[in-house]
Image (cartoon, rainbow, N blue to C red):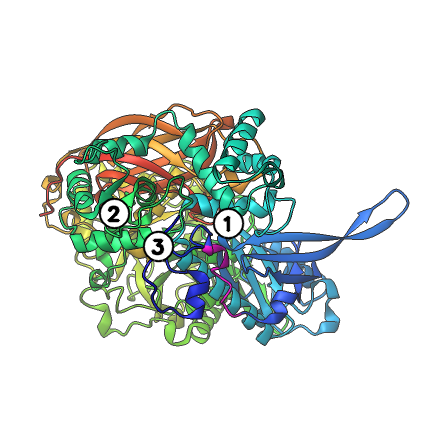
């Protein structure tokens, strides 16, 4: 029996979502009703009619419905089904769980919307089809920014108005692309979903991961209906399959019957099944009973002792013991106080955990279950929360003092020669944290009224083309909803003639308005402006010639200074020389440009140029300069000026290079192919997880000291013991497939003092058919040469075909020692869907780090 606690006054809404601990109904999972009080339009609960855009760009009428518990949106539409004698219409349903949603995005910045607009254009709206075929010859331009009359386009692709359109982005890169009947209806739907998503994020931290995971899979496997229904043992077997745990039917039935008896269910009730709350407790018990080596049990006994001072077995720990023996003794947290611990304990007591044993009612003590919940909680993450948190104090230095999250060929969705270009890639990059976007801009023909239409594509290839103006509009939509974002830098590779440049300048001013940073002549001298000064602004990187220097511009062309394809490099060099001899820079565009690409002669000479002059280098030039005597001059140059680096032209598959070498010499904009989800892009994700993922990370002081870099860092020892995993998902968000056989690759990426990249790799054994709570207990040792830039990467794989499941990259400068959890991310750097509940547990030991000078 659970004693009553002293009641306190709470509001009706608070009581519904979180009743007081110790109430007679405390065994219930109140999180199931956490969203009940969120106000939404009744029409959304009944089902609101929308237009759905399919993957091929076709449209159809559908119904969007929010479930009564507000955890799920369902899109229902008709699909034709061919029978033996005739065709008939059947209803199809697409469910998206609230935990899967990344964001609600207004507008039409997705590939599905782009295909719908192209489909409309092909049906007779002022456009020649050559524009999107990637021809290297001149082509007419899409003027889809003109208003289309309803009669000019077939109904399957018409009336997709941006002010009525929105997308539900889920599991990183998946979308439901919809249009409401009116702008008011669109805003009501989006606002309601935004409120629900915000409430879910707020409430989920009060719930144990196992409970969240069970709720996530419950409706998918429970044939008997919603969360309030019972689950028979056969259905519970499906739950175990979905959460990656294998249990023989006979063993499951035996455990089920025993558990039913323990909680007082007769045979008839056991046949009917378990409630959600009972199933959560049963799942918790299975995990406890199945551990052969119990990491939490071992940690508990090692730190606190198996027996208390009174001779009884230890089942709880006091706040003072927790502070002294665990936080200070084991975790090395010298700053922790008793006030901090008591605040933590209050949160742990407020958590909804499916306890296998009765929980303590003393607020100054926690149980082993609560201790385990803390180990996997965000506040115990191996990534130091102080480093992950945004620090506004660090945003007042010149731009040259930051690493800036940067992308290369942002518009491409695949390889450099034949893939498609998409406006959606700009939205994806911005939401991933990128703040330097690349646009390769070319003359694209003229609209029907003679207006020049610049296009963005990978020139002289078969990649498709998109409109410059559509990209600018997409960035503006992002700015509208994120007005406090730190500066978005547009890196222009400008191949346009003067009339097209004039059009570009006019559109930049008109669309961005006051959000466009226009430097004055006076502002160009002295240090570069700070991210704080440029907050909410768009900055142009391109060419701002100073007269006689006009032809000595820099270029980011992939083949411009690499020798992998000498013939193409010489051809492009000749074409560019001729182009810029004819087409200089339009004054209207030049005056909008802050960062001026300038050809390198020597770093010593470049140091004497104004701070807004900058250089671009391919990865091969980065390696070349890093291994030459000029490397220290380059580091000095990067203290006051900017450098951008980009992948070698030989990377036609859009693969990435290791960004650490360029970071190690202070390069600010190390541009990667964001469309390629590889280990190097994940290093970039980890680097910019620091400082709130705002896209700007202050470079370490070792890179800002004149002639002091070589002596600024000393090696340190790093020990990483991979203990276990919890709630690990299947690859690519899949549900109905075999249980995973997980293993972990642990890699330290570092830069040696000789300016050479190094990757030290270890791998755990494979745990077969258990992703729910795999146990490894394997230790790996590293020597870190350059801790200021080194990054530890842990990647989870499924042994079947070595499939990627999830990963986490943690800069060594952001690592915390002790028993720590690791939040895992999917390929899109997202933690939505089943990945949201997944963690690894590590034991990390770090040798003493030499303080920065």
Task: Please tell me whether mark 3 sits on a helix, a strand or a loop.
Answer: helix
User: Mark 2 and mark 3: span between their CA atoms?
Assistant: 13 Å
Which numbered disc covers residue 350?
A: 3
**Image vertical order of residue 770 relative to residue 485, above or below:** above
Task: Please tell me whether mark 1 sits on a helix, a strand or a loop.
Answer: loop
Quick one: label 1 or label 3, which is nearer the N terminus?
Answer: 1
Give the image location of residue 536, x and y in percent.
35, 69
654 to the left or right of 419: left
Q: Confirm whether residue 650 shows in the render.
A: no
Q: Nearer the viewer, mark 1 or mark 3?
A: 3
Give the image location of residue 712, x and y in percent.
11, 42
Quick one: label 2 or label 1, which is nearer the N terminus?
Answer: 1
Residue closest to the eye, 359 or 292: 359
* Residue position for label 1: 171
User: Mark 1 and mark 3: span between their CA atoms?
Assistant: 29 Å
Give the image location of residue 298, x and y in percent.
28, 30
User: Mark 2 and mark 1: span between their CA atoms?
Assistant: 38 Å
Quick one: label 2 or label 3, which is nearer the N terminus?
Answer: 3
Task: Please tell me whether mark 2 sits on a helix, a strand or a loop.
Answer: strand
**Image vertical order of residue 730 relative to residue 528, above or below:** above
Residue closest to the eye, 710 or 801: 801
Which numbered disc covers residue 365?
A: 2
Q: Which residues are magenta?
A: 30-39
Q: Is residue 636 magenta?
A: no
Marks 1 and 3 in Cβ contact (< 8 Å): no
310 to the left or right of 276: left
Q: Residues within 10 Å of mark 1 (few under 14, many from 20)?
A: many
Q: Main secondary structure of the magenta part?
A: loop
Give the image location of residue 114, x and y in percent.
60, 59
Q: Confirm whether residue 411 shows in the render.
A: yes
């Amino acid at each position: 029996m659970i004693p009553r606690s002293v009641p306190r006054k709470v509001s009706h809404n608070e009581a519904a979502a979180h009743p007081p601990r110790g109430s007679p109904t405390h065994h219930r999972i109140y999180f199931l009703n956490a969203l009940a009080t969120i106000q939404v339009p009744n029409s959304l609960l009944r089902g609101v009619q929308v237009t759905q855009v399919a993957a091929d760009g076709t449209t159809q009428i559908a119904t969007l419905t929010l479930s009564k518990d507000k955890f799920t949106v369902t899109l229902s539409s008709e699909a034709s089904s061919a029978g033996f004698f005739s065709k008939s219409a059947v209803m199809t349903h697409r469910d998206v769980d609230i935990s899967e949603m990344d964001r609600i995005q207004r507008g039409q910045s997705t590939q599905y919307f782009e295909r719908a607009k192209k489909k409309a254009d092909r049906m007779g709206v002022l456009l020649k089809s050559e524009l999107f075929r990637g021809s290297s010859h001149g082509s007419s331009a899409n003027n889809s920014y003109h208003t289309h009359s309803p009669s000019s386009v077939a109904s399957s692709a018409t009336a997709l108005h941006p002010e009525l359109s929105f997308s539900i982005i889920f599991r990183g890169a998946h979308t439901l692309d919809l249009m409401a009947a009116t702008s008011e209806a669109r805003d009501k739907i989006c606002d309601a979903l935004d409120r629900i998503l915000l409430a879910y994020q707020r409430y989920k931290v009060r719930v144990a991961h196992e409970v969240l995971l069970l709720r996530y899979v419950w409706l998918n496997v429970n044939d008997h209906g919603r969360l309030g229904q019972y689950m028979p043992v056969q259905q519970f077997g499906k739950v175990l399959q979905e959460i990656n745990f294998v249990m023989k039917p006979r063993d499951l039935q035996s455990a089920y019957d025993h558990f039913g008896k323990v909680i007082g269910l007769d045979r008839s009730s056991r046949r009917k099944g378990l409630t959600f709350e009972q199933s959560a407790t049963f799942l918790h018990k299975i995990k406890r009973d199945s551990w052969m080596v119990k990491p939490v049990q071992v940690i508990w006994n090692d730190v606190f002792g198996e027996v208390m001072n009174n001779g009884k077995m230890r089942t709880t720990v006091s706040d003072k013991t927790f502070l002294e023996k665990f936080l200070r003794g084991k975790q090395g947290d010298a700053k922790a106080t008793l006030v901090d611990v008591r605040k933590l304990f209050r949160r742990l007591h407020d958590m909804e955990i499916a306890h296998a044993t009765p929980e303590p009612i003393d607020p100054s003590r926690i149980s082993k279950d609560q201790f385990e919940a803390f180990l996997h909680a965000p506040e115990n993450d191996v990534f130091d929360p102080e480093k992950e948190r945004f620090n506004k104090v660090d945003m007042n230095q010149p731009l040259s003092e930051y690493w800036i999250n940067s992308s290369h060929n942002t518009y491409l969705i695949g390889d450099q020669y034949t893939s498609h270009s998409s406006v959606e890639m700009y939205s994806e990059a911005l939401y991933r944290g990128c703040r330097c976007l690349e646009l390769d801009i070319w003359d694209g023909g003229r609209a029907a009224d003679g207006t020049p239409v610049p296009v963005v594509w990978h020139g002289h290839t078969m990649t498709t083309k998109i409109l410059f103006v559509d990209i600018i509009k997409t960035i503006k939509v992002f700015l509208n909803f994120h007005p406090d974002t730190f500066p978005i830098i547009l890196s222009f590779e400008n191949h346009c003639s003067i009339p097209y440049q004039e059009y570009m300048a006019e559109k930049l001013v008109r669309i961005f308005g006051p959000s466009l940073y226009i430097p004055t002549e006076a502002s160009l001298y002295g240090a570069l402006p700070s991210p704080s000064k440029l907050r909410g602004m768009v900055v142009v990187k391109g060419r701002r010639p100073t007269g006689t220097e006009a032809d000595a511009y820099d270029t980011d062309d992939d083949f411009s200074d690499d020798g992998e394809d000498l013939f193409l490099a010489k051809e492009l060099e000749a074409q560019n020389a001729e182009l810029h001899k004819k087409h200089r820079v339009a004054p209207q565009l030049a005056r909008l440009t802050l960062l001026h690409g300038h050809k390198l002669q020597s770093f010593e000479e470049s140091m004497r140029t104004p701070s807004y002059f900058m250089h671009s280098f391919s990865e091969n030039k980065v390696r070349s300069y890093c291994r030459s005597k000029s490397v220290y001059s380059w580091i000095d140059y990067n203290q006051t000026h900017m450098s951008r680096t980009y992948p070698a032209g030989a990377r036609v598959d859009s693969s990435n290079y290791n960004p650490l070498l360029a970071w190690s010499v202070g390069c600010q904009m190390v541009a990667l192919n964001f469309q390629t989800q590889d280990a190097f892009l994940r290093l970039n994700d980890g680097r910019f997880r620091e400082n709130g993922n705002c896209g700007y990370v202050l470079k370490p002081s070792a890179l800002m000291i004149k002639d002091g870099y070589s002596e600024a860092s000393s090696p340190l020892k790093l020990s990483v013991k991979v203990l276990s995993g919890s709630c690990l998902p299947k690859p690519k968000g899949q549900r109905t497939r075999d249980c995973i056989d997980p293993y972990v690759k642990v890699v330290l990426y570092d830069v040696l003092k000789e300016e050479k990249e190094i990757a030290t790799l270890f791998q755990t054994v494979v745990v077969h058919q258990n992703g729910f709570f795999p146990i490894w207990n394997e230790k790996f040792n590293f020597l870190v040469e350059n801790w200021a830039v080194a990054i530890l990467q842990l990647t989870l794989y499924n042994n079947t075909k070595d499939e990627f499941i999830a990963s986490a990259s943690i800069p060594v400068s952001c690592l915390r020692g002790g028993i720590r959890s690791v939040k895992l991310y999917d390929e899109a750097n997202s933690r939505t869907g089943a990945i949201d509940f997944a963690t690894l547990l590590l034991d990390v030991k770090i040798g003493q780090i030499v303080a920065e000078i």
